[in-house]
Amino acid sequence: LIQELEDLGINPANMNGYALADLREDMNAIYNPTPANDAALLSRGVTETTVVNNVKAKASFGICPHLALKIGYFISELKSQLYLNAGIMQLNGHLIPTTNNIYGIRNEKFKKITPFVTLGVARSITDNLMATVEVSHAFKITKKLQNIEIFRYNIENRASINRTDIKIMFIYKI
C-alpha cells in the first residue's frame, strides 16, 4: 500500500493514522469493489466512459522510415521549388501513459505502417545556400493495447496515433 500511495503522490509519513485508515478503506473500495461501492461510484458520475476519457497517453517516436514519390514545380523567377511528397511511413515508438499507474497501464511499443504527405518549399538564398521548409503529416493509425480492468469494468484499450512534423533545413553546397 505504501508504494501505491507514493505512486499517487501521497506521502504516508505526513498522514495521521485516522486519515491513513480512511484512505486504505477508499483504496480497497477501488481495488476490490462491492456492489455498494459500484453504486457509490455511479452516483458520483464514475462510469466506464469517464474512466476511458481519463486515460491519456503520449506517443514518443523513434526512427520512422518512409518511402515516397516526390513531385514538384520549380519557379525560376523566385529561385524556389514547391513540392509534394506522398507515400508510406512506418511509425515506430512508445505509448507512454500520462495517468498514474492506478489503472495498471504500462508503456507499450508500436510499429505500424500508414500513408503520409509532405508539402514543402525550397528556395535558393545564394548559389551555395538553400533553405527548405516542410510540413509532413502521417495519417492516424489505431493500436490495440492491454485492456484496462478497474471498477469492475473491463475496458478495451485502443490508442489513435498520428504524427505531424515541421522541418526547417538549410543546405550548403561545397
Image: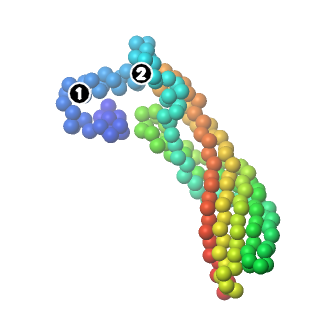
Q: Quadrant of residue 117?
A: bottom right
**Farthest front residue in view:** 77
* Location of mark 2 (residue): 44
Q: Does 151 sit left or right of 115 as displayed?
A: left
| Disc 2 and disc 1 in contact, CB within 8 angstroms | no
| Image quadrant occupied by the C terminus | bottom right
**Between 26 and 40, the one nearer to me in the picture:** 40
Residue 51 seen anywhere in this rendered image of the structure: yes
Colour scheme: rainbow
Residue 164, labelled with which disc?
Answer: none
Q: Does 92 sit left or right of 118 as displayed?
A: left
* Location of mark 1 (residue): 19
Find residue 55 and report its horizontal and vertical position in percent: 50, 36
Q: Earlier in the sequence, mark 2 or mark 1?
A: 1
Q: Residue at x 40, y 24 (%)?
A: 30
Q: Is residue 50 above or below residue 136?
A: above
Q: Does 122 sit left or right of 69 as displayed?
A: left
Q: Is residue 107 above or below residue 81?
A: above
Q: Quadrant of residue 31?
A: top left
* Residue type at the position of mark 2: Arg
Find residue 27 and report its horizontal and vertical position in percent: 35, 26
Which type of secondary structure does the marked residue at label 2 adopt? loop
Q: Residue at x 61, y 69 (%)?
A: 168
